[in-house]
């Protein structure tokens, strides 16, 4: 069963202790919920183990702690709202000229990839590029 978003998997004090040991900003309950939502949304379909909110693997808790301090420091940084029409770069200085960042980009190209979270979850998730095959 995937992560459910109605109850927290981790305790706030455990998250605070984890972050203090590493010199990170202290998470809040709000940032823990946003962090758990991020982990659930990004990884629920990729987990290779079954669990619920009461027996989540340690890797999931650690990933939530990592996401929570980022969300405490910069709310919605892990799940930004993106409007594709305004992504441009300045290409000239003598005359103001703008050019789209890159043709063919989608909103997912702007969603941050946090390597420490990927690495913490690596033992219990499938690769993002995994294709499941059915043998008949």
Image (cartoon, grey):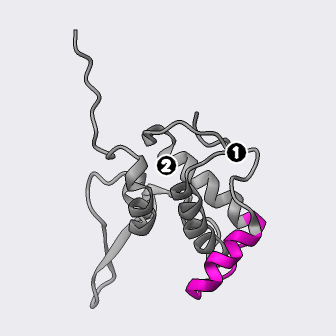
Identify the magenta region: 13-30
Would you name the residue on which mark 2 appears? Answer: 42
Q: Residue furthest left?
A: 136
- Rendered image quadrant of residue 95: bottom left
User: Which secondary structure dominates the residues rendered in magenta?
Assistant: helix
Quadrant occupied by the C terminus: top left
Is residue 29 depicted above or below 103 in this figure? Answer: below
Where disc 2 sits, the SS reads: helix
- Between 93 and 71, the residue placed more toward the observer is 71
Q: Which residue is drawn at the image coordinates 40% and 60% (left, top)? A: 118
Q: Residues within 10 Å of mark 1 (few under 14, many from 20)?
A: few
- Between 44 and 78, the residue placed more toward the observer is 44
Q: Earlier in the sequence, mark 1 or mark 2?
A: 2
* Rendering coords of residue 43 (x, y %): 48, 47
Q: Which residue is drawn at the image coordinates 63% and 55% (left, top)? A: 36
Q: Residues within 10 Å of mark 2 (few under 14, many from 20)?
A: few
Would you name the residue on which mark 1 appears? Answer: 54
Q: Which residue is drawn at the image coordinates 22% and 15% (left, top)? A: 135
* Rendering coords of residue 45 (x, y %): 47, 38
**Disc number lying in front (1 or 2):** 1
Q: Residue furthest top?
A: 136
């Amino acid at each position: 069963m995937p992560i459910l978003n109605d109850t927290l998997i981790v305790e706030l004090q455990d998250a605070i202790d984890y972050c203090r040991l590493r010199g990170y900003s202290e998470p809040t309950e709000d940032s823990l919920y946003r962090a758990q939502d991020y982990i659930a949304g990004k990884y629920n379909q990729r987990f290779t183990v079954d669990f619920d909110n009461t027996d989540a693997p340690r890797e999931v808790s650690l990933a939530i702690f990592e996401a929570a301090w980022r969300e405490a420091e910069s709310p919605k940084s892990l799940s930004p709202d993106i409007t594709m029409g305004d992504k441009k770069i300045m290409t000239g200085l003598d005359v103001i000229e703008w050019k789209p960042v890159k043709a063919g980009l989608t909103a997912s190209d702007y969603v941050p990839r946090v390597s420490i979270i990927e690495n913490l979850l690596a033992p219990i998730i499938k690769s993002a590029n995994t294709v499941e095959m059915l043998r008949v």
